Image: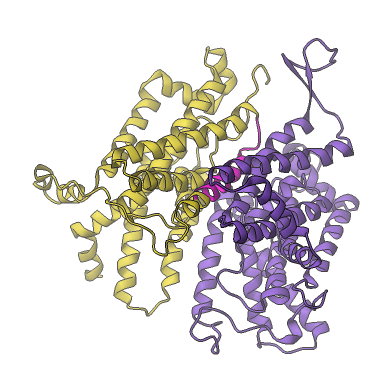
Chain colours: A purple, B yellow
């Protein structure tokens, strides 16, 4: 008989081992549909690894892909820590991107030292507002934020589509629904010549470190965690729970908005309707793999980005749909959920002494 | 305003409204069964996608339509079982598990579609369910032609609504479902196994949702498209709250929603491009949020919703 004992502390080895094991199991599970599709599984995984990290260029592609995932992963981690279910990062990302082109594509002209911060603030603010509305509906009216944030994704994306057909449509775009490119002053500099890697990565890394420090060393960070662990207890301890939700919402939405800023100003140059292939949703998986730890988000984001970039290469070579990457991401989330059991409980066998354990 | 009145009074309008409402009725009923047992199922959007894909693919490969519906329901039930294993048996977060199921079911469906049909540019069509057109039904004034203009799946949806209502309130099984959704410990004291009841409810609810997805490929669009569920699962979630977790009210909400959607499509045509079409496309999502705000004050949430139950633990 299996015996479970609650764990009181999680060793670093376990904290690292469980997500790694979850991803490995997810990759093994993904081998099943690959095998059914008649793909040589071993070769497929070798190609994926090469595509993700087999050359300097591949590595820069992976880090480029990781940049928005770090932002959206942080957005999810920050919110989920306080048990504020922000499933709207996809829409917040687009809101941030929209603000970037609204301001950065010619409406304002300033030197880069002012232009880039201005665009970043606008994008972060747009994302924050998109999360603030569902959160106020939650704190004022008790409306569940899960459904409202999910629905808000569709509203924002349709609004983007409307703007790209109307006010923000590029007059030189040949009729395509796309915005004008952002001014050179608003563009984020490239980090490595001849690659697409841009300064958005540095901003994402800085955000991760800042959130980590904020979580650890500030009262607001402590309050957010307390609300997540036990809202009733937090309220009893004098923490203003609703104010905490609002702060967390602004931070979370702003982070997702920055993902949009970074994609437009750093990578694409303009806004199109296919800016994000689900970065907002993948951010949730990233956050869960990282066990909501801000620095873990960076590692998980790079890994998930590697899966996407590697799957692209593998898919092109072997004729496999690139949706295999989305499948691996989804499977990683499910295996991680199971893996969490090993973080919560010590699994042993009946018969061993286990004080306070239960069968 | 006379024009609007004329529009709403036509049989064609209500045929469209009921057709638009049908996938939502399935979705609402499936989600309601899960939530009544205390399990939030955010897998709904993905389960509907998988149902749409499974039903369509079965027919595409030569199965008859009802076999396709059965396959869709079976796929939905399997995904429901996975959701129940993670949330009910292992006590994982219902929010995160549901998102995981949605990501898994939709990416799995898309992957399968792409692998089976790598080179198609336009989605292959199937011979769908046809409107029943029963003469005896059409003879009934106004309501008759509206119903006769629907396919068999709409009748299945309405029959399921009656069945879910009956089972939940008139049978011991339904009482057990409601009991474990309100107070699983008390239910267990009555000899009900909350774990088993919750698993069965999630499996049954997920099967129903999947048929809602299958309706879209087998009765509405006759083909499978990417992103074709387009938030219908999330709208169904909102409608369950709007209907205060009562099947009758929730189904009525879905029909009202269908009517609103049919109305906005006609309004859009009447406006002739004076207002960007995206505004109209946004309305269903905005309306869902407004509906949630309106009912939020008097929402009668099942008390044990989203709370994992561990035997013998208070």
Q: Does residue B31 lie above or below A47 as drawn?
A: above
> Which quadrant of the figure has residue A24?
top right
Q: Is residue A225 magenta?
A: no
**Can residue B246 be seen?**
no
**Can residue A212 be seen?**
yes
Residue A248: x and y in percent read 74, 55
Residue at (82% x, 58% y) in the render: A208
Q: Tell me which segment is drawn in magenta.
A: B91-109
Left or right position of A208 against B212: right
Residue A196: x and y in percent read 74, 73
Residue at (51% x, 47% y) in the render: B46
Residue at (86% x, 34% y) in the render: A10
Q: Does residue A166 lie above or below B83 as drawn?
A: below
Residue A252: x and y in percent read 72, 58
> Which quadrant of the figure has residue A191?
bottom right
Q: Does the magenta stretch include residue B105?
A: yes
């Amino acid at each position: 008989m299996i015996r479970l004992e609650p764990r009181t502390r999680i060793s670093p080895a376990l904290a690292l081992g469980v997500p790694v094991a979850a991803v490995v199991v997810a990759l093994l599970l993904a081998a099943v549909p690959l095998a059914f599709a008649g793909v040589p599984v071993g070769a497929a995984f070798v190609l994926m690894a090469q595509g993700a990290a087999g050359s300097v260029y591949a590595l820069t592609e992976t880090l480029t892909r990781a940049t928005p995932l770090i932002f959206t992963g942080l957005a999810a981690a920050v919110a989920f820590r306080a048990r504020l279910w922000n499933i709207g990062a996809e829409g917040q990302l687009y809101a941030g991107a929209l603000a970037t082109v609204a301001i950065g594509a010619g409406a304002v002209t300033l030197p880069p030292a002012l232009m880039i911060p201005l665009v970043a603030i606008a994008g972060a603010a747009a994302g924050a507002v998109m999360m603030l509305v569902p959160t106020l509906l939650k704190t004022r009216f008790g409306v569940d934020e899960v459904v409202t944030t999910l629905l808000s994704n569709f509203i924002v994306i349709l609004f983007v589509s409307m703007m790209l057909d109307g006010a923000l449509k590029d007059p030189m775009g040949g009729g395509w629904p796309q915005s004008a490119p952002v001014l050179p002053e608003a563009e984020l500099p490239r980090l490595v010549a001849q690659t697409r890697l841009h300064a958005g990565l540095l901003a994402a890394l800085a955000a991760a470190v800042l959130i980590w420090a904020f979580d650890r060393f500030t009262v607001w960070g402590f309050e957010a965690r307390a609300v997540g662990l036990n809202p009733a207890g937090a309220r009893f301890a004098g923490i203003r729970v609703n104010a905490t939700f609002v702060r967390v919402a602004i931070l979370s939405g702003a982070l997702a908005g920055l993902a949009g800023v970074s994609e437009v100003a750093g990578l694409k140059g303009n806004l199109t309707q296919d800016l994000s292939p689900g970065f907002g949703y993948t951010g949730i998986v990233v956050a869960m793999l990282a066990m909501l730890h801000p620095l873990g988000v960076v590692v998980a984001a790079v890994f998930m980005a590697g899966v996407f970039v590697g799957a692209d290469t593998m898919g092109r070579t072997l004729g496999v749909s690139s949706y295999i990457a989305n499948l691996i991401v989804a499977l990683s989330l499910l295996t991680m959920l199971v893996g969490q059991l090993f973080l919560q409980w010590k699994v042993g066998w009946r018969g061993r002494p286990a004080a306070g354990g239960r069968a | 305003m006379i024009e609007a009145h004329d529009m709403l009074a036509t049989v064609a309008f209500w045929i469209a409204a009921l057709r638009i409402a049908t996938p939502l009725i399935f979705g609402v009923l499936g989600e309601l069964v899960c939530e009544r047992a205390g399990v939030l199922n955010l897998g709904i959007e993905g389960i509907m996608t998988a149902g749409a894909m499974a039903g369509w693919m079965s027919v595409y490969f030569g199965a008859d339509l009802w076999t396709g519906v059965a396959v869709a329901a079976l796929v939905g039930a399997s995904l429901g079982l996975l959701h129940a294993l993670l949330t009910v048996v292992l006590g994982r977060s219902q929010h995160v598990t549901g998102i995981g199921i949605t990501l898994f079911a939709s990416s799995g469906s898309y992957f399968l579609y792409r692998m089976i049909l790598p080179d198609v540019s336009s989605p292959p069509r199937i011979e769908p369910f046809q409107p029943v057109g029963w003469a005896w039904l059409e003879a009934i004034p106004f309501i008759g032609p509206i119903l006769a203009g629907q396919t068999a799946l709409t009748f299945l949806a309405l029959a399921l609504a009656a069945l879910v209502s009956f089972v939940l309130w008139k049978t011991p099984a339904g009482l057990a479902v409601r009991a474990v959704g309100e107070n699983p410990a008390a239910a267990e004291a009555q000899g009900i196994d909350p774990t088993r009841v919750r698993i069965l409810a999630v499996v049954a609810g997920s099967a129903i949702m999947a048929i809602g997805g299958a309706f879209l490929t087998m009765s509405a669009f006759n083909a499978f498209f990417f992103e074709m569920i387009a938030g219908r699962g999330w709208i169904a979630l909102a409608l369950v709250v709007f209907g205060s977790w009562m099947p009758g009210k929730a189904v009525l909400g879905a029909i009202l929603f269908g009517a609103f959607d049919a109305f906005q499509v006609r309004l859009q045509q009447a406006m002739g491009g004076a207002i960007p079409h995206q505004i109209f496309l946004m309305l269903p999502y905005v309306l869902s949020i407004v509906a949630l705000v309106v009912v939020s004050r008097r929402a009668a949430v099942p008390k044990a919703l989203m709370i994992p139950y561990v035997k013998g633990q208070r």
